[in-house]
Amino acid sequence: MSQSKQKQARRCVSCGINISGSNAASFKCPDCGQQIYRCAKCRKQSNLYECPDCGFMGP
């Protein structure tokens, strides 16, 4: 993956902001394994997220 795509991919899947804080989460989708990023605020508020590849939804 190119550097510009990596930076673009490091966006919170819930709210869309660029991830830069140390409290951000990075994990693989339980269904398809796509890397998912969430910001600290969305994690704390338990905002829903949707995998951009398969549509899996989680808290």
Image (cartoon, grey):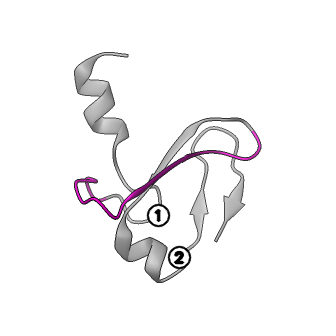
Q: Is residue 43 magenta?
A: no
31 or 26: nearer the viewer: 26
* Stretch of the chain drawn in magenta: 17-31
Which residue is the site of mark 1? Answer: 14
Which of the marked residues, 1 or 2, is nearer the chain's N terminus?
Answer: 1
Q: Is residue 34 above or below residue 27?
A: above
Quarter of the figure that contains the C terminus: bottom right
Q: Quadrant of the N terminus?
A: top left
Q: Quadrant of residue 49?
A: bottom right
Residue type at tag 2 = Asn
Question: Where residue 24 appears, x then y in whole percent?
Answer: 37, 60
For residue 4, what is the image quadrant?
top left
Majority SS type along the magenta span: loop
Q: Secondary structure at mark 1?
A: loop
Q: Residue at x 47, y 83 (%)?
A: 45
Q: Find numbered disc 2 in the image and state the secondary structure of the residue it sits on.
A: loop
